[in-house]
Amino acid sequence: MSDKKKKLNLNRVSMPKQLLEERKHNFQEVALGYSEEQAIEEAKRCLQCKKPRCMAGCPVELDIPKFIKAIQDGKMWEAVRIIKSKNSLPGICGRVCPQEVQCECKCVLNKKDAPIAIGRLERFVADWEARQKDRPSPEVLPPTGKKVAVVGSGPAGLTCASDLARMGNQVTVFEALHEAGGVLVYGIPEFRLPKDIVKSEVEYVKSLGAELELNSVVGRLVQVDELLKMGYDAIFLGIGAGAPRFLNVPGENLNGVYSANEYLTRVNLMKAYKFPEYDTPIRQGSKVAVVGGGNVTMDAARSAIRLGADEVHVIYRRSELEMPARLEESENAKEEGVIFDFLTNPTRFIADDRGRVKAMEVVTMELGKPDESGRRRPVVKEGSEHIIEMDTIIIAVGTMPNPLVPTNTPGLETTRWGTLVADENGRTTMEGVWAGGDITSGGATVISAMGSARRASADIDTWLKEKGPWNC
Ligand code: FAD
Ligand code: SF4
């Protein structure tokens, strides 16, 4: 039957969620995932277009119609095989990718406001596989005899490591922290991305043969050029952009003012939400303000709700229309009681007599002409200063690269934003060294980090093949 003749089913199968009153008080996952019946029902809405547009929206080029067809036919192992041939982290991507602006926005049914729930189906397949007792061993090509060092175990590092290991290279991943996963473990909270999912997908990467060296800070314990001298034929830098940005307003160093990075790392990686089982202190806060408008802001605000704050405000200098957070996340935040103060910007933080933050001065903003980002520029409304009482402030206005590796690696050029200079395949200005993910793009998304790592791994593999001993 042709695509046009096929009857359109515009009833997207909705995803069951944890009950609102319960989820506000725990850190368990909010979205519960499709059952097998629900996944098949949703998959059957796919038209199996002859010229599918959805694939063009996927940075790792997943064969979307093919894996959805496998679900339609109840062939779940086939769906696993198709997905894993392109994506080693499907349980993660199915949960956190902004599908609404990627594959799903390209789906033909998006015109009718009912795109196929591609992300939810990807998540279903990953979770289905995780429940199976006997999983086939992944296919790996014979050893090439080449050694590659991957620095950083976020989505970029894990993708590059799995691709290169699958191609038969000996891969070692050096990770500064005591757990692998990058932002997936220290930034994105459990209620959005359970850490067991990250652990299981890291285990999959290890099952391909990649080795993991935790607590290994490259640029301090060992330098990039030393890795090359130690016998690594190529290096991939997937070190992210994890240094917090601040507002640079008076009072930002007061007690009770956190960067979102510190706040979320305490909550997620250091498990402050399980205090006293985990000995990580965090300020619970009675009136909490989170400054920013992205996913990080929503994660911090929703964490504060769960830690028991009485009132949590998102302070955003533009209007709701410009807010970069995923719609699903800002809606979840609203449902959970987060209050949004749009067109508002802090100008200073005010201390009590013990040096702890007790209030902030804010100004009201108006939207002017579009700036270089295309969004309307916020402009201060004259005489609009006013004070809002708050006892905990979380600054979530973006991140930038940590300069440790570039400053210790002569030959690695950086841009004026501190990101590494690299071509479209991730080749840096240093022979034998590639980079990808947030360290080249600046703070972006999980799947864009994975896409750039995929292009780099293909280029590294070709380069390694050409660089045989006869070429050295
Ligand atoms: P990272 O994930 O930052 O990983 C870099 C790794 O390198 C880290 O493990 C770090 O410890 C390690 N490292 C750094 N320096 C060194 C060194 N010198 N030696 C050894 N190891 C080093 N994106 C989405 O798509 N959807 C979302 O919902 C989403 N939510 C987010 C929520 C939060 C709170 C944050 C902070 C980000 C979010 N993002 C989201 C963005 C996304 O997580 C990042 O774009 C992505 O993780 C970038 O991947 P990466 O591998 O480049 O870097
Ligand atoms: Fe077509 Fe959408 Fe199915 Fe892709 S997901 S094949 S665009 S109906």
Image (tube, rainbow, N blue to C red):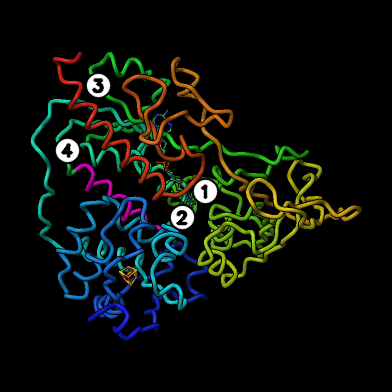
In space, the residues marked 3 and 4 are separated at their CA atoms by 16 Å
Sequence-earlier tag: 4 or 2: 4
Q: Secondary structure at mark 2?
A: loop
In this picture, which residue range is highlighted in magenta?
A: 193-206
Q: Secondary structure at mark 3?
A: loop
User: Residue 200, image x and y in percent?
Assistant: 26, 52
Above or below, 55 against 239 in this view is below
Q: Is residue 379 left or right of residue 196?
A: right
Above or below, 410 against 198 in this view is above
User: Residue 351, image x and y in percent?
Assistant: 79, 44
Q: Secondary structure at mark 1?
A: helix
Please state which of the two labelled residues, at mark 3 or mark 2, is closer to the viewer: 3
In space, the residues marked 4 and 2 are separated at their CA atoms by 33 Å
- CB atoms of marks 2 and 1 within 8 Å: yes
In space, the residues marked 2 and 1 are separated at their CA atoms by 7 Å
Q: Give the main secondary structure, helix, strand or loop, of the magenta stretch.
A: helix
- CB atoms of marks 3 and 2 within 8 Å: no
Residue picked out by circle 2: 189
Q: What residue sits 48% from the left and 39% below the top?
A: 441
Residue picked out by circle 3: 232
